[in-house]
């Protein structure tokens, strides 16, 4: 019989804190305004699994209203659990959140956020979990549906879902951890910190294997250790010290083997690895170098590409952006961040046959930023669809024509001279 040990007190650290959220898009039509995480743990109740749902809302995505000397934002959150066919509502939780910011700068920061936790107990199986947020002031609503499998921990040796840790500290003698809900990891900083539970019907020695695969499923890190499991619930904190991971998507797999190397159970976690000083939306070094075509000369790009080693290529890439930094004394490189913000926006808004940054609208947006005005003509009876982008500060306008009728807008008035310069 397993002994249940509550871990809510371990990670119920949900006050305002800091992170490095980037703007994640689940689809092109809607950029969800919050991060979410679902984690399965043994509940201690027969035939039930506890699912912890974390929702992290950045301050920059909600509307604050001045109240006295402070600024207040209020929003509601909803978690709805349906069967896998969306035919039956199984559980629903609705609650309100209120944030008080001491000054206006706090409300604008992309690093401040509010983190919420709710738990629901479900039978093992497949579900659809819908999360929704409504801003009380603007009345804007955002939601997303997630297919989710609730795992079964009822017998034998099992491992819970893996929680990535953003921060760990001791408060009043208790170990408090804050989960990394965005799953962005600064791999050159503190390593990969994680928390998980293991459940066993008896005391036994097992081999734990930690493997990290890159986006091409190549194993880029591997380590293992023998540990002793006690009967019941065992809680583990682990830090994987490795700063050699490349940018972008990775998959961490934690596996349990017996001492004869037979696989018993495993759990995995996808995450994005980042480098210090590099914008969060830069997730592929080779792609990022290719995307620099609008700001770097052919000679500068060749110099980066011709580096003999990967470390040298990384150094040349970062050195290029250091030169562009208008304020090298502070931690932020505004030009670096803004350039790849524009690239990400172009990919989100203008992708068609090509990636958005390679389209004509993407090129103009990356070079000149958002236009002061866009005059759209999608349904004029006497012409093909077209758009006119106006830039008042340089007294220029650019016409894009959809000659095929399939959204492939091409630049009619070309960029030339001083226009073809990043601003």
Image (spheres, rainbow, N blue to C red):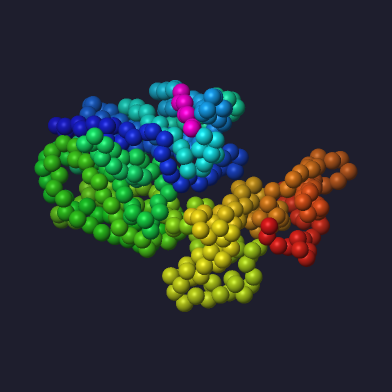
Q: Quadrant of the C terminus?
A: bottom right
Residue 393 coordinates in the image, percent (x, y): 77, 51
Is 351 or 24 nearer to us in this picture?
24
Is 401 or 196 nearer to us in this picture?
196
The residue at the point 44 percent across, 57 percent down is 276
Residue 99 lies in the magenta-colored region: yes
Position of 390 relative to 316 (above/below): above
Q: Outermost residue toward the left?
A: 203
Residue range highlighted in magenta: 96-102
In the visual, does 196 lie left or right of 389? left
Position of 43 relative to 208 (above/below): above
Is 404 or 283 nearer to us in this picture?
283
The residue at the point 69 percent across, 48 percent down is 370
The residue at the point 45 percent across, 26 percent down is 97
Residue 64 lies in the magenta-colored region: no
In the visual, does 126 lie left or right of 171? right
Instruction: Report if residue 89 is visible in the image.
Output: no
Residue 422 coordinates in the image, percent (x, y): 68, 60
Residue 130 coordinates in the image, percent (x, y): 47, 30
Residue 200: name its quadrant: top left
The residue at the point 44 percent across, 74 percent down is 309
């Amino acid at each position: 019989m397993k002994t249940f040990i509550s871990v809510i007190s371990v990670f119920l650290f949900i006050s305002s804190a800091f992170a490095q959220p980037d703007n994640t898009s689940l689809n092109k039509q809607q950029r969800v305004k919050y991060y979410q995480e679902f984690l399965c743990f043994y509940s201690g109740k027969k035939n039930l699994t506890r699912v912890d749902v974390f929702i992290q809302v950045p301050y920059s995505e909600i509307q604050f209203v001045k109240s006295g000397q402070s600024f207040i934002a209020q929003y509601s959150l909803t978690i709805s659990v349906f069967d896998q066919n969306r035919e039956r509502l199984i559980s629903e939780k609705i609650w309100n959140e209120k944030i008080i910011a001491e000054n206006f700068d706090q409300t604008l920061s992309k690093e401040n956020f509010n983190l919420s936790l709710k738990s629901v107990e479900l039978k093992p199986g497949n579900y659809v979990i819908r999360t929704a947020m409504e801003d009380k002031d603007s009345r804007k609503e955002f939601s997303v549906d997630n297919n989710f499998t609730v795992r079964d921990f009822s017998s034998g040796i099992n491992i819970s879902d893996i929680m990535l840790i953003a921060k760990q500290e001791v408060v009043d003698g208790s170990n408090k951890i804050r989960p990394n809900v965005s799953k962005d990891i600064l791999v050159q900083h503190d390593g990969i910190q994680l928390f998980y539970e293991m459940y066993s019907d008896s005391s036994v020695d097992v081999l734990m294997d930690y493997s990290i695969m890159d986006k091409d499923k190549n194993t880029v890190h591997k380590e293992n250790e023998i540990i002793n499991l006690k009967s019941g619930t065992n809680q583990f904190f682990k830090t994987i010290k490795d700063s050699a991971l490349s940018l972008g998507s990775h998959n961490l797999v934690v596996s349990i083997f017996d001492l004869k190397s037979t696989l018993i159970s495993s759990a995995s976690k996808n995450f994005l690895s980042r480098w210090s000083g590099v914008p969060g939306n830069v997730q592929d070094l080779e792609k990022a170098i290719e995307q620099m075509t609008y700001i770097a000369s052919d000679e500068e790009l060749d110099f980066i590409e011709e580096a003999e080693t990967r470390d040298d290529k990384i150094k040349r890439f970062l050195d290029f952006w250091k030169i562009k930094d208008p304020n090298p004394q502070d931690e932020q490189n505004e030009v670096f961040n803004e350039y790849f913000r524009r690239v990400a926006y172009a990919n989100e808004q203008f992708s068609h046959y090509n990636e958005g940054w390679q389209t004509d609208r993407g090129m103009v947006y990356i070079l000149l930023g958002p236009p002061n005005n866009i005059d759209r003509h999608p349904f004029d009876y006497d012409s093909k669809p077209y758009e006119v982008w106006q830039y008042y500060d340089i007294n220029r306008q650019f016409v894009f024509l959809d000659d095929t009728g399939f959204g492939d807008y091409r630049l009619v008035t070309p960029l030339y001279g001083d226009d073809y310069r990043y601003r």
